[in-house]
Image: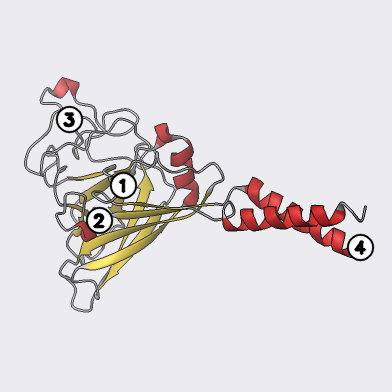
Amino acid sequence: MKTTAPLICVAHLILGTYFTAHAATAVTYEFRNGVNGYNGQSSSYISSYSPDNNSGGLAYVQALNWTVRNGHSVIAFMRWDLSDVDGSAGIAQASLQLTIDGREQRSATGYSATYNLYPVLRAGLDYGNGNGAVPVEGAISYSSALYSSDPEKRIGWGTSGTITKGPVAGEDYSDVLLGSFTLTADNTTRTTMTIALDPEVIASWVNNPSTNYGFIIIGEPQSPYDVDSVLIRTEGQTTVEWRPYLQVETIPEPGAVALLLGGSVLFFGYRLAK
C-alpha cells in the first residue's frame, strides 16, 4: 500500500493539473461579419409606411412603435449562423453589441424608449434585398411574410397567413424576451449598446439549428411619441466596428470538471490515510 500510494498521488496531480489548464475552461465565440472569415449574420426591416416594400441590403435597420399614436410601426429582423458553437455542455452567457445612431428627441423634457428582442417562430423568411425602395418577390414586407406581385400568391402574417399589418406576437414571434435596450435623452448621437441575451434561447438555437429563425427588434408603444425610429447599423455597414457583434460563452464540459474533482478527492484522501 505504501508503495503504490505515492504513484496514485502523482498520477492524480498530473491529471488535475492537465484538466485545470485545458478542459475546465469556458470557450467564448465571437461573431461579426467580415471578421475571421465569418459572414453568417443578416438583417432587414419592414415598415408600415411602405407596407409592400422590402428593406434588406441596407447599412442599417430601423425600429419604431407609434401604434398608439397613428397605427404605424417599423420592425427590424436579425439572424446569426451559430453552427460553429459547441453548446453540448450548455451556454453560460451571451451578449449582443449594436451601434445605434441616436434620433432627435421630440419632447421638451427628454424621453425614454425601450426596444425588445424576441425570437422569430416562423421558418423560411427571406430578408430580401430591396433597399427599402421596392417590393421583392418572395421576401418579407410589412403586409406579407412572403410578398408576391400576384395577390393570390401572397402569404400574410399570423398562423392563418392572412394578417397584413405586420408579424403577430405568439404566432410569428415568441413572447419570450431574448433581450432589450433603452434609449434616453443622452442617446441622441451614435451609441454602442451591449445587450445581455437569454442563454437558454441561444442554447436552443445552437442545439437545434433548424429552429434558429433569428429575432425581431420591436419598440414598446410610445405615447406621446418622443423619438423617431431608432437606426441600427448592420452587416452592410462599411465600418467594420459598427457592425453587429455577438459573443457566446459556453459552460465547461462537466466530465472534465468531475474528473478533476475526483482526482482531488483521492489525493486528499490518500494524504489523510497516510
Q: Residue at x 57, y 51 (%)?
A: 252
> For the residue labelled by badge 3, is the local secondary structure a helix, a strand or a loop?
loop
Q: Which mark is residue 216?
A: 1
Q: Amino acid at mark 3?
A: Tyr
Residue that sits furthest to the front in the current view: 3
Q: CA distance from mark 3 to mark 1?
A: 18 Å
Q: CA distance from mark 4 to mark 3?
A: 77 Å
Categorize mark 3 by other alpha carbons within 10 Å: few (<14), some (14-19), many (20+).
many
Q: Amino acid at mark 2?
A: Val
Q: Which mark is residue 274?
A: 4
Mark 2 — residue? 68
Residue that sits furthest to the bottom in the current view: 109
Q: CA distance from mark 2 to mark 1?
A: 20 Å
Residue 40: x %, y % from top left: 29, 42
Mark earlier in primary sequence (2, 4): 2
Residue 206: x %, y % from top left: 45, 40
Residue 7: x %, y % from top left: 81, 53
> Foreground residue, 208 or 119?
208
